[in-house]
Amino acid sequence: MQNYLFFGIIIYMSKDIKIVLTGDRPTGKLHLGHFVGSIQNRIKLQNEADKSYYMIADIQGLTDNASNPQKIRDNVIEVALDNLACGLDPKKTTMFIQSEVPEIAELTVIFLNLVTLARLKRNPTVKDEMKQKGFGEDVPAGFLCYPISQAADILFTKANLIPVGEDQLPVIEQANEIVDSFNRYYGDVFNHIKHLTSNTPRLIGTDGSAKMGKSLNNAIYLSDSLEEISKKVMNMYTDPGHIHVEDPGKIEGNVVFSYLDIFDSNRAEVDELKKQYRKGGLGDVVIKKRLISVLENTIGPIRAKREELSKDKNAIMKILEKGTNEAREKAKETMIEVREALKINYF
Ligand code: ATP
Ligand code: MG
């Protein structure tokens, strides 16, 4: 009997505690890339994890929108609505606003000492984004440092599992380096974090570019109307060499087929369409109409739920307020540990 109890305790203690954190920048409404890249995993994990957090990264949004705070403010409610409409459940996930947890800023300042300028400039995601935004050497310091503040966002909750799109992997890697440096100097306070990517870690844009992004003007939004979806799909690239219906067409680099591969659950029919398209005799409009209907099947129910939820924006703000209060309690707890570790706990 005693032995069973002993082993029971060991098993309980060694069970991996799963704490999940994810988030979005309130820089615009959310799109299909978010849905397949991260949101679907968020929804699944909120039922499996021991604790689940969702953060609206308004301070991070400001790092490249300093002159436009209204845009960030307006989109806080939009990204909350998008997540709730997809099935994020505030009873299972603590939803909070980054700027209302000032301990994150405090932790960021401490982490700043653990990262060099050379390392910041080497982060491939930041490098890509700086190029896209045309920053060059005039990059706002806050933007260059966002991987550091993102480490603080994650670590104050002691989260260890982060569902993200592929573009965020270098940022997670940098967060783990911060964990190593912190623990080496100040003792074991933080644990390594793991990323979780989906089957579609990077959804391409409607223009065929490497990533659908809300700041890139190439997105189909979860709130788009059927007319908007239709217009965007009708404008998608197929194969520029496929001029007449009877011409053989290419599948590789064909944006419409890339999307059908991801969103159309009828694999057999998509394979048959590809065969026909390659041979010639299948028009672009046929495959585009199919894609419109497939995307409407995914987005339609989300749009409807979103419209219903958006009738009571006060209720959404109440959810965020409650979640933020809870996150703040956790942040205070973590900061007591951090201050102790750094010997800056004077009074
Ligand atoms: P911005 O252009 O303002 O950075 P964004 O579209 O990149 O906006 P974020 O709020 O930065 O969106 O990203 C939120 C989450 O969604 C991250 O985990 C990110 O990796 C994921 N994500 C964003 N775009 C895509 C995409 N096209 N495919 C897969 N995942 C994506
Ligand atoms: Mg982004």
Image: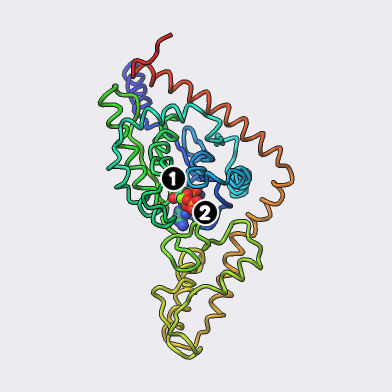
The quarter in which the C terminus is drawn is top left
Q: Nearer the viewer, residue 165 or 3?
A: 165
The quarter in which the N terminus is drawn is top left
Name the side, left or right, on which 25 lies relative to 140. Answer: right
306 in relation to 100, above or below = below
Question: Residue 319 in the image: x percent, y percent?
Answer: 64, 35
Under mark 1, the amino acid is: Pro
Question: How many other residues sit within 10 Å of disc 2, few (<14), some (14-19) or many (≥20)?
Answer: many
Residue that label 2 marks? 35
Under mark 2, the amino acid is: Phe
Q: Nearer the viewer, residue 288 or 1?
A: 288
Marks 2/1: CA distance? 11 Å
Residue that label 1 marks? 163
Question: How many other residues sit within 10 Å of disc 1, few (<14), some (14-19) or many (≥20)?
Answer: many
Residue at the extreme top of the image, as rendered: 347
Mark 1 vs ligand 1: CB below 8 Å: yes
State which tag comes first along the sequence, 2 or 1. Answer: 2
Name the side, left or right, on which 322 lies relative to 238. Answer: right
Residue 199 appears in the picture as rendered: no
Q: Residue at x 44, y 78 (%)?
A: 274
Name the element at disc 2: helix
Name the side, left or right, on which 213 lies relative to 73. Answer: left
Question: Residue 12 in the image: x percent, y percent?
Answer: 38, 26
Name the element at disc 1: strand
Q: Residue at x 52, y 73 (%)?
A: 236
